[in-house]
Image: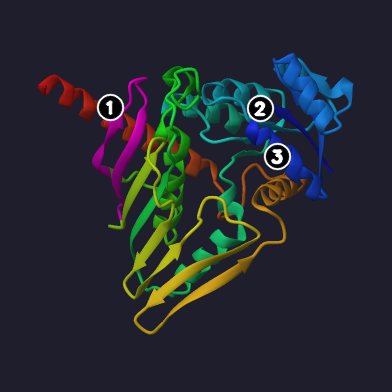
Amino acid sequence: MVNWGIIGLGNMANKFASSISEVKNSKLLGISSENFLRLKTFGDKYGIEKKYRYKNYDEILNSKEINAIYISTINNTHAEIVIKAAKAKKNILCEKPIATNYDDTIKIFETLYKSDVFFLEAFAYRLHEQTKFVINKIIEGEIGELQSIESTFGFFSKKINYKSRLFNPDLGGGAILDVGCYPVSFSILLANLKKTGTAEPKILNVSGSICKTNVDDIAYASLVFENKIISKIGAAIRLKMKNQTSIIGSKGNIIIDNPWLPSKKSFIEINSKQRSYKSFINSELDIFSNQINSVSRYILDGKKEADFPGMKWNDTIQNMLIIDNWKKKLFKINNERKQKI
């Protein structure tokens, strides 16, 4: 049994706490928040003993009874907490993105490589049965040789609020960090199915916009990998996108209608010259319960990173390198455009 603690008690923490009740190898033992009211409300809601309600992060990290930490704080705090958790010898599941830039990500892994703890960046879709099913279809040659990918994740936030984590650059806001990391992470997975290692792709055709709070609210790019696979990606916090992933091969294509939050019963569309059909996929657990169950199993097995197709440590490093460079290119283009006006 893995005894879990949560740092940060927002929306994702609630999803974690409600999902863990479905998992047999895991128990939510402790919680931590610097907000006393939130600590009390959350603790009462999920029946956390008062002695395991910690008012600061150091206290929960020093608990001898808690051996795994779920980090669901604001983006700009992830790096510091992950490093502290690793030094405290706690296994770690951290919400995406792991950090707000590539340099901080490298610092995190300098600590992780010296530690003996498990770490996973929480892209829950990567461990879901739907993703595994899609990968098997590609490997089996269902759509021939993989040629290109089209993947988006975008939603519309009506109110631009500087205090919101989405629109505050100091808090790690913006579309690329918040949701652009999803299509990038899927592109890395698919483009590198037939090779070991992950060479950095070229980032081309960058476009998008910067909103008045100085965060990217809409962003597009093309990733061109060494094996000539091209992935066209999009992310937005001020535009509703298709939120689909299309995988195009030499003999057909696969369309994933709900790539990021597949339910227990999901489906994909497979189209070829011979036929078009839907394949239905069943998962015993919901996406978040499945992630907790998988991570706890890895921890109990003494592993330091997830099995394929979960986010490997190198995947997380490359993911941040790409989204960091994508973001820098977009801001550079917009700054150059302003100077010409």
Q: To which quarter of the image does residue 337 belong?
A: top left
Q: Is residue 218 left or right of residue 133?
A: left
Asked if the stretch drawn in magenta spans residue 51, the answer is: no
Q: Residue at coordinates 42% horizontally, 62% vertically from top-left?
A: 194
306 to 176, vertically: above or below: below
Q: How many marks?
A: 3
At mark 3, the secondary structure is: helix
Residue named by callout 1: 331
Q: CA distance from mark 1 to mark 3?
A: 34 Å
Q: Is residue 249 left or right of residue 270?
A: left
Tell me the amino acid under the disc marked 2: Ala
Q: Residue at coordinates 27% horizontally, 57% vertically from top-left?
A: 228
Tell me which numbered mark, 2 or 3, is placed earlier along the sequence.
3
**Outermost residue to the front:** 158
Q: Looking at the picture, how far across and down is residue 272, in whole percent?
A: 37, 78
Residue named by callout 2: 86
- What range is drawn magenta here? 203-226
State whether the magenta stretch is mostly helix, strand or loop: strand
Q: CA distance from mark 1 to mark 2?
A: 33 Å
Q: CA distance from mark 2 to mark 3?
A: 20 Å
Tell me whether circle 2 and circle 3 mark residues in contact (CB < 8 Å): no
16 to 72, vertically: above or below: below
Front residue (pair 299, 339)? 339
